[in-house]
Amino acid sequence: EIKLLAISGSLRQNSSNTALMNAIIGLAPENMKFTIYSGLGDLPHFNPDIDIDEGPVPVRGLRTQLKEADGVLLCTPEYGNGVPGVLKNALDWLVSTTEFMNKPTAVISASPTPMGGDKAHASLLLTLKMINAEIVERGTLIIPHITLKLNKEGIITDPKLKQELLSVLQALEQACY
Ligand code: FNR
């Protein structure tokens, strides 16, 4: 059994990235046990001045959940050609600690645009590499036109995407053993 932490970079109620994250969890084999991290919006703005002892309570929660996970799944939109502030803020809280070190991480960006959030994806990889996360080989995906591939019920209607997601899951699973 593998424990995974799934994080969506979108706070939006009807987020396609959150729906995608849930769909991926639905596709996963039984031995991959996912926990959804839902505290992104509750983290204080990163400030080293308040990162004393174990840090602010919400930050401790994030760090503990990460520590307990064998691997991580990130699904993120792109805002203003970059990583959403809330997700970058969470990562900033993890630069000074070791929770992400060697942690197998699958990185997915999805966007309704033809570019699929490629710039946020690239930027996210830069940050993850800086904190020594293990970016899973074949565990990264940039998904353009997400709204044409995932229906309102959160079901993946595009067979090619479904196949790609299954292979990301397989790569993540293997990296966690
Ligand atoms: C966007 N969106 C967007 N998309 C993109 O691919 N690159 C970008 O730089 C931006 N920038 C951007 C700025 C602002 C202010 C908004 C409101 C939107 C579109 C974005 O991909 C779209 O709203 C997604 O649906 C957001 O992801 P979730 O919330 O559906 O997961």
Image (cartoon, grey):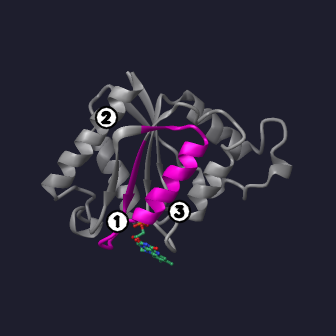
Q: Which residue is mark 3?
A: 83
Quadrant occupied by the N terminus: top left
Disc on res. 90? none
Residue at 34% x, 65% y: name it.
Answer: 116
Q: Which residue is mark 2?
A: 171
Q: Are marks 2 and 1 in contact (CB under 8 Å)?
A: no
Outermost residue, left side: 159
On the picture, is 112 further left or further right than 148?
right
Quadrant occupied by the C terminus: top left
Q: CA distance from mark 1 to mark 3?
A: 12 Å
Residue at 69% x, 44% y: name it.
Answer: 59
Mark 3, residues whose alpha carbon is within 10 Å: few (<14), some, or many (≥20)? many
Q: Quadrant of ligand 1?
A: bottom left
Residue at 73% x, 55% y: name it.
Answer: 46
Is residue 127 inside the magenta stretch? yes
Q: CA distance from mark 2 to mark 3?
A: 24 Å
Span of residues in magenta: 106-135
The one nearer the camera, 151 or 87, is 87
Q: Earlier in the sequence, mark 2 or mark 3?
A: 3
Q: Secondary structure at mark 3?
A: loop
Q: Earlier in the sequence, mark 1 or mark 3?
A: 3
Whether residue 131 appears in this view of the structure is yes
On the picture, is 33 further left or further right than 153?
right
Mark 1, residues whose alpha carbon is within 10 Å: few (<14), some, or many (≥20)? many
How many marks overall? 3
Q: Secondary structure at mark 1?
A: loop
Three-letter code, disc 3? Val
Q: Mark 1 CB in 8 Å range of ligand 1?
A: yes
